[in-house]
Amino acid sequence: MELNRRAFCAGMAGVTGLALARPALAATNRLTARKASVQLAPEGYPATEVWSYDGTIPGPLIRAPQGGRVTRQLVNELDEPTSIHWHGIRIDNAMDGVAGLTQEPAAPGETFEYDFAVPDAGTYWYHAHKNSMEQVARGLSGVLIVGEPTPPDVDRDEVLMLDDWLLDPDTGQFAEPFNHPMMMSHGGRSGNLIGVNGQYAYTMQAETGERLRLRLINAANARIFGLKLEGMTGWTVALDGMPLDTPEAVTGEIVLAPAQRTDLIVDVTATDGLAALLMSLGGDTWEALVEITITGARAARDTVPSPLPANPNTALPDLSNARSFAMVMEGGAMAGMDSATYEGEQLDFRALIEKGQYWALSGQAGMSDTPFAALKRGEVARIKLTNRTVFPHAMHLHGMHFREVRADGSFGPMRDTILSIPNEPLEIAFTADNPGKWLFHCHMLAHAASGMTAWIDVA
């Protein structure tokens, strides 16, 4: 079942001049979830039957101006219900797309109307949120870009949606079952083929001296990408859509957990005859994830990029009267847990496994009828995350952004997804300024499906 870059290189014999694939701009106000056939693997391997929006992987690229609205009709042509979550947008709760919490999913043959304001500029994405472990892995995701009124001084703005797919190399189809106990109880579903914008061996062209904005999005189910730049000098200017106060020079590895985004501004320094590379760490080896061919040269800028304009309502939370909560992550292989509550019943670990529940958040496996935290609008919450498992978890809060509270009391940048490492203390804080029922879960989607899902009520 091993299907890696080396294996695919054999299938690349005689294949030259790979076309540059870019996410297609949405042409209508409709997104149709349907089956399609896409050449995910290199030519020579069979095409893959995927589930997609409008027949492409990723789905149509949606662009909207800051302060504008996004209106899309979801048309469900699948054989099972589905919904769309607009990841990272501080959105009206009724439009958040969480089946069973904020809306009823669209049944096969039905539609759902999404219509919401986009208050924050930045890099966001959208994906299925019904049976998301399988539906997202099959391809139901796309990119949402909210543009600043005054864009930064760059020559080009490029979207790079990183993903992986677990394929059977003989058939080119997705390996099944999606809910394999090994994946559910370990690190999640990681693929054996990595690609960018739905394409293996992704290539671009640029000139020496060009300044690019690279919008990196991790759409993988479980893979944590370790990335680095070669032939480029870069600065991080935004995380999870939210601008940093000051651009930070990229000096080492970029860690991008599932669902996280990083906006970089890079200057191409590679010269003709060489290539600029976005490298990905696989095991102990760095491999080219994106290859940028140099086609010429132009005068380079000699200035550090300016900060992106701040989004509204990003003040630091006032911790003086904050309410404190503790979220303990338990379960999984090699650690386990004694027991947890599932569907109102206290069950031991063996009984939980029989019901497909391998994980728990503060003693609760899966969604409960009561929220993890009930907050009043404007209240500040502090959540201490304790990871007692042996696996990392990318914890994502819907509807609001939070900040890490560091050991010295200082705050980290605003994020909607944060990586929790086993046995490493982690605390976050946020102002509950968006009313509604908001999911808080692990974005290793197999973990969410098998226990690591809670919700927060803001009234």
Image (cartoon, grey):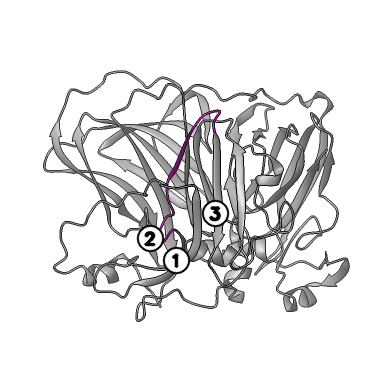
The numbered disc on residue 191 is: 1
Residue type for callout 2: Ile
Identify which amino acid the numbered label 1 is placed on: Gly
Q: Earlier in the sequence, mark 3 or mark 1?
A: 3
Of the residues tagged 3 and 2, which is closer to the observer?
Answer: 3
Q: Dot 2 surroundings within 10 Å: few (below 14), some, or many (20 or more)? A: many
**Residue drawn at point x = 55 percent, y = 64 percent:** 135
Which image quadrant: the C terminus?
top right
Q: Are marks 3 and 2 in contact (CB under 8 Å)?
A: no
- Secondary structure, mark 3, is strand
User: At x 75% / y 24%, what residue is drawn?
Assistant: 318
The total of numbered circles placed on residues is 3
Residue at image coords 55%, 59%:
75
Which mark, by number, is residue 212?
A: none
Q: Which residue is mark 3?
A: 127
Give the magenta range.
54-68
Element on which disc 1 rests: loop
Q: Residue at x 14, y 30 (%)?
A: 297
- Dot 2 lies on which element? strand
Residue 300, compared with residue 449, is above or below; it is above
Q: Dot 1, crowdedness within 10 Å: few (<14), some or many (≥20)?
A: many
Q: Where is mark 2, residue-wise? A: 194
Residue 86 point in image, percent of width and height = 58, 46
CB-based contact (under 8 Å), mark 2 and mark 1: yes
Whether 382 is among the magenta residues is: no
| Residue 111 in the figure: left or right of residue 24 | right
Residue in front for this viewpoint, 99 or 304:
99
> To which quarter of the image does residue 407 belong?
top right
Coordinates of residue 202 in the picture (x, y in percent): 29, 53
First in sequence, mark 3 or 2: give its number.
3
